[in-house]
């Protein structure tokens, strides 16, 4: 989803900062974008490192001369039953990467966003914030925290003209879901989603982009499922 989002913004003329934990994936995406005559730069960033967040955000703002949009997209799959031996470790990792990192990114970006003409923050959560899967309580709790963070900051920052919104992807074809057998994915999609299929990363990316366009200037505090109707379907 991060790659698709970077491409969506670049094609709209944005100067895109791409990050990932070791920098290699981000560099590959940035090179792809630049090869098409568009503008992107890559940085290595471990979102569990508070100091690194501050340094990278400052470097991005310095390199581009401004910062208009922050998309919090870092993700990790974390699962453990409540009585599992590794539960505390899984919980800490989920909250650190999926929730704490988002508020740290926002705090680091705020001084620059406050100088932008139309600042936008888009947080990526999950439909696990709106429902639940057995054995995924650390993940679900962290993602639900993202929706709460989004609404609270939308209220707090609204007076400054900063919009804060949240997207909750459902079943999307990403490396996390592609590890499941195709037959299992097809059964799940037909059983759970109204559109009877998995979504593409591009479908999430275009919703992210939409929330940052002038047409979305009066949308803030929204929690938007991009899930093929998963949350709407009872049976």
Image: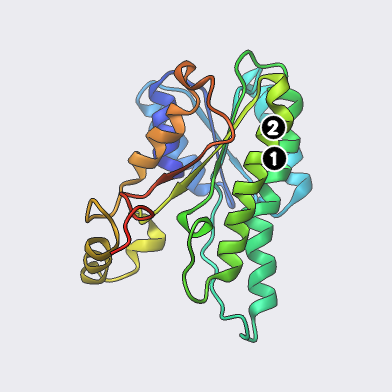
The one nearer the camera, 199 or 20, is 199
Q: Tag 2: Cα neighbours inside 10 Å, few (<14), some, or many (≥20)?
A: some
Evaluate if marks 1 and 2 touch, with contact meaning CB atoms under 8 Å apart.
Answer: yes
Mark 1 lies on a secondary structure that is helix
Colouring used for the render: rainbow
Quadrant in which the C terminus is drawn:
bottom left
Numbered circles on residues, count? 2
- Residue 185's label in the rendered image is none
- Residue 155's label in the rendered image is 2
Mark 2 lies on a secondary structure that is helix
Residue 66 on image: x %, y %: 65, 19
Residue 5 on image: x %, y %: 43, 36
| Quarter occupied by residue 143 | bottom right
Residue at 41% x, 34% y is 207
Say whether residue 217 is left or right of residue 8. right
Residue 31 showing in the rendered view: no
Say whether residue 96 is left or right of residue 216. right
Residue 175 on image: x %, y %: 39, 59
Does 1 sit above or below residue 40? below
What distance separates the C-alpha of mark 1 from that of mark 2? 5 Å
- Residue 152's label in the rendered image is 1
Residue farthest toward the front in the current orientation of the protein: 234
Residue farthest toward the top in the current orientation of the protein: 117
Q: Tag 1: Cα neighbours inside 10 Å, few (<14), some, or many (≥20)?
A: some
């Amino acid at each position: 989803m991060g790659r698709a989002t970077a491409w969506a913004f670049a094609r709209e003329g944005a100067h895109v900062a791409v990050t990932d934990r070791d920098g290699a994936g981000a560099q590959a995406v940035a090179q792809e974008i630049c090869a098409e005559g568009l503008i992107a730069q890559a940085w290595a960033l471990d979102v569990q490192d508070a100091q690194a967040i501050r340094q990278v955000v400052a470097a991005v703002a310095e390199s581009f001369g401004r910062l208009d949009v922050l998309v919090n997209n870092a993700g990790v799959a974390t699962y453990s039953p409540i009585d599992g031996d590794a539960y505390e470790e899984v919980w800490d990792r989920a909250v650190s990467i999926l929730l704490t990192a988002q508020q740290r990114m926002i705090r680091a970006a705020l001084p620059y966003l406050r100088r932008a003409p139309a600042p936008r923050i888009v947080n990526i959560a999950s439909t696990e914030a709106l429902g639940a899967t057995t054995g995924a309580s650390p993940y679900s709790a962290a993602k639900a925290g993202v929706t709460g963070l989004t609404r609270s900051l939308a209220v707090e920052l609204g007076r400054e003209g900063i919009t804060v919104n949240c997207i909750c992807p459902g079943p999307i074809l990403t490396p996390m879901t592609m590890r499941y057998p195709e037959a299992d994915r097809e059964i799940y999609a037909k059983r759970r989603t109204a559109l009877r299929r998995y979504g593409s990363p591009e479908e999430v990316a275009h919703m992210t982009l939409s929330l940052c366009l002038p047409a979305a200037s009066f949308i803030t505090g929204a929690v938007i499922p991009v899930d093929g109707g998963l949350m709407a379907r009872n049976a």
